[in-house]
Image: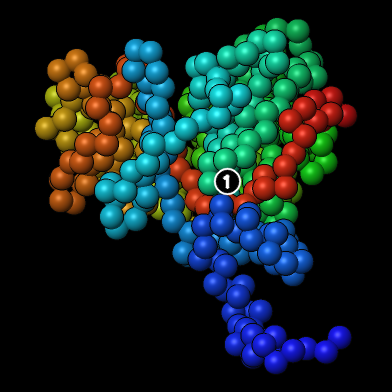
Amino acid sequence: MEVSDKERKMLDYQLPFEIQIEIMKWLPAESLIRFRSVSKPWKLLISSLKFNCDYTTHHAQRQHLLLGYTRPSQGFLVSIVDDHTFPEHKLNVTIPESLELKELQVVGSSHGLLCFVGVPGNYEKNTPNDVVIWNPSIKKFVSICLLNVKKSCSHHQYSFVGFGVCPNTLDPKIVKICTCKHKCNVNVEVFTFNSKVSRSPSSNILLHVDFTYPYNNVVIDGFIYWFVFEIRERVYMIVSFDLTNEEFTKTRLPDELELSLKWSDHMDTRIFKLREYLVVVLQSMKTPQEVFEVWKMENGVTRSFTKLFNINIPDLSVIQLCGFNKNGQFILETDNCGSRDLVAYEPHKKSINNLVNDGRIGSFMVTYYTESLLLSHGYDARPNWVRPV
């Protein structure tokens, strides 16, 4: 077919496809979803695994801090752009009605996806074992019903889940862990989106691990991390799960940190992501001042810990540390004359920014996400992958 003069001029001014790709990496995820309808090359590009990987990890993708809280009769979500303007750019986020859960708890954030567990609000359509995976950038979610894992003992103390996305395949994975209070056994199953089945890992080194402190899990560089207590050796340690090869690793804490944990009865210890590092944070309630002791894990999976600093905050009545923003500010739940507030504390300048006021006690949730295209192709909301194999 012959090209007209007008069409030839348009082609002469058309940008090379390689430049188009680079431009697209800077665009919002919602725009890219619409752009799949522009042309077949664009649809193939935006749907490709490589572009999804490049887009999620591109330096232009802004991180968002997501804050959740409730007041007497209503729950709220606020997204704050986490860059040099923090906390100026705030946006109220609306959760789809069908996604709402009672006693909502976020258990993980990875590649722009958030994982929630809780008691569902609609008992006719859901079961109390529901897990919800949500992409707030494109307003897509999937609800998964997890059946009980295979039991080696009929008495289970509790169960909880971890969540992460495999960096190589972009396959979201849910790790369900059940502990047995009588035999001190731990049963593990891994649910994957691509396989749509659950399976037990080939090796389970968690057999004698008591997850006494599974407050949260942290995902960094393709690993899920938990802070746990080892029954057999009577020590605290970090347990990690490799999202690529699905293997667990246990790591001892430094002697100095272990000693602090053993001799400090009023320590609240949790793990967080600080920039691109895993940190262990001890919060002491033993002194009149709030003291935070921060340890950083070095060298990725080789695991060595370095103490970064102590932080004293005498001017705040701190209830708990909820996380960090991208620049290293502490996100703290505080007591302000009986009112629960969420503030950002800058340790070097010792400045305080109010983020949320008058939240209900124990209702604050702090997590983060980046722009992502995952879930844009949709998943069956009730897939047949609740049956262990």
In the image, what residue occupies the spot 15% across and 51% down? 349
Residue 107 quadrant: top right
Q: How crowded is mark 1: few (under 14 residues within 10 Å), some or many (20 or more)?
A: many
Position in image of residue 293 (x %, y %): 29, 39
The chosen color scheme is rainbow
In the rendered view, tell whether residue 274 sits above or below residue 162. below
Given residues 207 and 21, the one toward you in this image is 21
Task: Report the amino acid beneath label 1.
Answer: Ile
Q: Is residue 65 visible?
A: yes
Given residues 40 and 137, the one toward you in this image is 40
Residue 172 quadrant: top right
In the image, what residue occupies the spot 62% across and 72% down? 21
Residue 76 quadrant: top left
User: In the rendered view of the protein, which quadrant contains the C terminus?
Assistant: top right
Given residues 169 and 214, the one toward you in this image is 169
In the image, what residue occupies the spot 47% across and 32% down? 94
In the rendered view, tell whether residue 349 sits above or below residue 146. below
Position in image of residue 345 (x %, y %): 22, 41
Dot 1: what SS?
loop
In the rendered view, tell whether residue 363 sits above or below residue 271. above
Could you tell whether 281 is left or right of 60 in the image?
left
Q: Is residue 234 visible?
A: no
Q: Residue under circle 1?
A: 138
Could you tell whether 287 is left or right of 11 in the image?
left
User: In the rendered view of the protein, which quadrant contains the N terminus?
Assistant: bottom right
